[in-house]
Image (cartoon, helix red, strand yellow):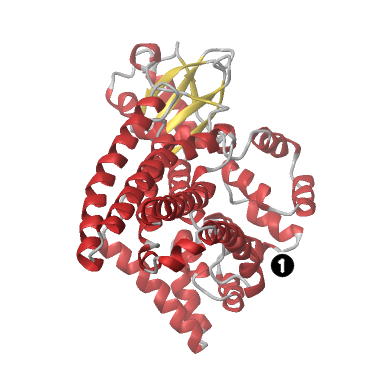
Amino acid sequence: MTETPEKSLSTHDHIKDVSAIIHSGSFASAKSILQAMHPAEIADLLESQPPHKRQFIWRMVDREFEGEVLMELGDEVRESLVEDMDTEQLRLISEHLDLDDLADFIQSLPEQLNRELLAHMDFQDRRRLESVLSYPEDSAGGLMDLDIITVRADVTLDVVLRYLRRRGSMPRHTDRLIVIDRFGYYLGALPLRRLLTCETTTIVDEVMRSDVPTIHVDQSDSEVARVFEDHDLVSAAVVDDKNKLLGRITIDDVVDVIRDEAEQSVMSMAGLNQEDDIFAPVIRSSRKRAVWLGVNLLTAFLAAWVTAQFADTIDKVVTLAILMTIVPSMGGIAGSQTLTIVIRGQALGQVNRTNTRWLLFKEIMVGLMNGTLWACVVGAVTYWWFGDMDIGLVIGLAILTNLAVAAMSGVMIPIVLRWLKVDPALAGGVILTTITDVIGLLAFLGLATLILL
C-alpha cells in the first residue's frame, strides 16, 4: 500500500530526530523514539549512519525486532553488524523470523556461522528450513513460505471456521485458504470473503476457486513478480511438477523482488550493486569501482587508437578536431534509448525469438529516420559555422551511419548477452559505448579522409 505524504514525512522526521539526538549524546531519548519506529524505518536509519554510529543504534533495537531489521538492510550493512555476533545471539534473532526470511538470513551468513546456527535448531525446524534452502535464492522455491493453512474440498464452511477458531491465528497476508486433496495435491483456493459470506452448510468444493494461478517451484523471482502483477495477487500457492502443494508466496516478498530489480537495473549501469553500503570503507569502495573504471578505460583507449589512425587527416583539416565528439555522442544517446527499451522488454517478457527480427527492423528504421533528420540539422549548422559544404556532408553521413548502427546494437547487445547468460544491464552499456564511439569516429574520420583529402 502506498504511504501518504504525511506518513512519509513522519518517517523522515523520525530518522532526522534520532540522528540529531544520538549526535547530542542523549541515548535514552533516542531509544524511546526508536521503539516507536517500524523495522524498515530503523533499517533506513542504520543505513544512513556512518559505521561507528550504527553500533550505538543497533544496541538500542528491541531483541524482538532485530531479525526484521536485519532483513530490511542491504547485504553489506547486515554483514557489518552480524560479524560481531556469536551463535547464541544469531539463534535468538532467528527465532523471530518467518521461515522464508530465515532462509534468506541463513544464506547471507558466513559458512561457519551458517553451520553452527543450523546445528542449534531442532530437527523439525532444520528440516523445514533445508527444504527451502534446497532451491535457488532467486526462484519461487527460495521465496516460498511453508507456513500455510490448507483445507479439504469435501468439508463444510462451518468445519473450516471451527478449525480456524481452534488455530487462534493465521499467517500474515492470508487472503485465501489453499484447498488440497487427501494426498496434498493442489485443487484450488477458498477466498476468505467467500468463507465469511456464504452459508456455513456450503461444501468447500462448491465455493472454492480453481482458476487462481499457481507458481511452479522452479520459476524465477522475476516471473513470480509478473504473475502477481498480472493477476493482482496477494498470495499464491507454490507447486511442483506433479501439482503437489509445497508452500506459498506472499505479496511482501514480491514487493522486495520488484524493488531489488529496479535498484539493480539502475546500479548495474554503473557497475555497482544495490546492496553496496554508501558508508563502506574507502578501500572497499575504491576496489569495487576500480574494476568498472578499468573496463571503461580500455574502451577509451580503443577509441583513441581509432582516432590515431587518422592523425594525418586531423592535422590537415583542423576543423575535424572541433567536431569529432559530436558523432559518438549522438550515437551513444540513440543507442542507450534502444538498449533501455529492449532490456525493459526482456524483463517484462515482451522480447522473444518470434518478434526479434521485427523489433530489429523497426529500431533500425527509427535510427535511419532520426539519423537523416539530425544529419541535415548538424550538416546545415556545420556549413553555416565553417562555410564548408564538404565538412557538413561528412558529419551528416557519419551521424546517419552511427545512429543506424547504434539502433542495431541496442537491440542485438541485450539479446546476445541474455543468450550468454550475462546481465544486459551490467555489461550492455559498456559494449554499446565502445561500439558507438569506435563506429562514430571511424565513420567520421574515414569519410573525411575519402572526401576531403
Location of mark 1 (residue): 84
User: Residue 20's x, y, as percent?
Assistant: 44, 83
Quarter placement of the C terminus: bottom left
Q: Tell me where residue 110 sits by quadrant.
A: bottom right
Classify mark 1: helix, strand or loop.
loop
Along the viewing direction, whichever of 19 and 337 lies nearer the viewer: 337
Determine crowd level at label 1: few under 14, some 14-19, many 20+ residues with C-alpha closer than 10 A.
few
> Is residue 427 found left or right of 211 in the rendered image?
right
Rendered view: 418 above or below 310:
above
User: Residue 22's x, y, as percent?
Assistant: 50, 82
Residue 173 can be seen, yes or no? no
Rendered view: 451 above or below 421:
below
Q: Residue at x 60, y 70 (%)?
A: 280
Q: Residue at x 33, y 19 (%)?
A: 200
User: Residue 132's x, y, as percent?
Assistant: 64, 35
> Is residue 368 found left or right of 59 in the rendered image?
left
Along the viewing direction, whichever of 406 and 247 lies nearer the viewer: 406
Residue at the far bottom: name it.
24
Q: Residue at x 52, y 87 (%)?
A: 25
At label 1, the amino acid type is Asp
Residue at the far front: name it.
453
